[in-house]
Image (cartoon, rainbow, N blue to C red):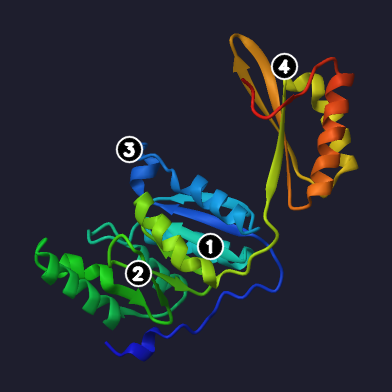
Amino acid sequence: MANDRFEPVIEAQPTRLRGAAVLVIGDEILSGRTQDTNTGYIARWLGQLGIPVREARTVSDVEAEIVAAVRALSARYDYVFTTGGIGPTHDDITADSMARAFETGIDYHPIAFAELAARYTASQIGTFNEARQRMARVPFGASLVRNAMSVAPGFQIGNVFVMAGIPAVMQSMLEDIRPRLVAGAKLTSRTLSVYLGEGRIAKGLAAVQKQFPDVPLGSYPFMREGKYGTSLVARGNNEDRLAAAAEALKLMVREAGGEPLEGEPV
């Protein structure tokens, strides 16, 4: 278990901000047995760093599917964050899939192996058996991603950050990743709600978007106490432009016969 095999050979240093992608790995998500809460958390967390999530995918525990998704997303975006599939069981194949995606080998990382062995010895929670040893397997060229919840690590290979699927552990790993990211301006949003259907405001919304091409605008229908309405959301990192877009949305809503309400509908 030579340590030099695991020294990172590819660092994630984007030259322009293309954003990030989230890749959720696991049959339990696709079957509906487990609800994915990680994607939303990652998107909000990255938004605070000014890194927009541009795409999210979910794939099954099939190596070919994971490899294809990782290669496509890592080529398209500055960063890829994966969750799931790095535990001790037979269907935890994410580490092997990452090795194949980056065309490298895989072995027990000496630091991870030693730390896991020490944890199981000290805690008396069970033997450090072959299944648990699997959690120390890391592709060559990867660097460890620590987590404060337990010793079992994730890892970074290239611009891909491989994390656990358990939400609390994944969130802990993000804090170890934070210093490795090139942050942008913090992303914020302004929300207006109106008791008008999307069809009533679609044309006006398109006109406002044309007026503010640099401010992404979204419309989200809702129903409250039997009444249809629409929430309008403007997102960006320029507060002046956001404020101007919000005022334009208010004017548009009033011209359509509605009264804009600040924030989400109540």
Which percent across, then down, holds residue 27?
35, 47
Numbered disc in front, either 2 or 3: 3
Quadrant in which the C terminus is drawn: top right
User: Which residue was labeled with disc 4?
Assistant: 195
The image shows residue 19, relative to residue 138, as above or below, that is above
Mark-to-mark CA distance, 3 and 1 = 24 Å
Instruction: Judge the density around disc 4: few (<14), some (14-19), many (≥20) Cα neighbours within 10 Å.
Output: many
Q: Which residue is mark 1?
A: 80
- Residue lying at 27% horizontally and 72% vertically, measured from the top left: 136
Badge 3 local density, few (<14 within 10 Å), some, or many (20+)? few
Res 239 visible: yes
| Mark 2 touches mark 3? (CB < 8 Å) | no
Secondary structure of residue under mark 3: loop
Secondary structure under tag 4 reads loop
The mark found on residue 162 in the picture is none
Say which residue appears at 61% left-offset and 54% top-offset. 48
- Going from N to C along the chain, the mark reached first, 4 or 2, is 2
Relative to 150, is 224 above or below? above
Q: Position of residue 98 (x, y in %)?
A: 42, 69
In the rendered structure, find residue 33 and report the number of the disc placed on it.
3
Q: Residues within 10 Å of mark 2 (few under 14, many from 20)?
A: many
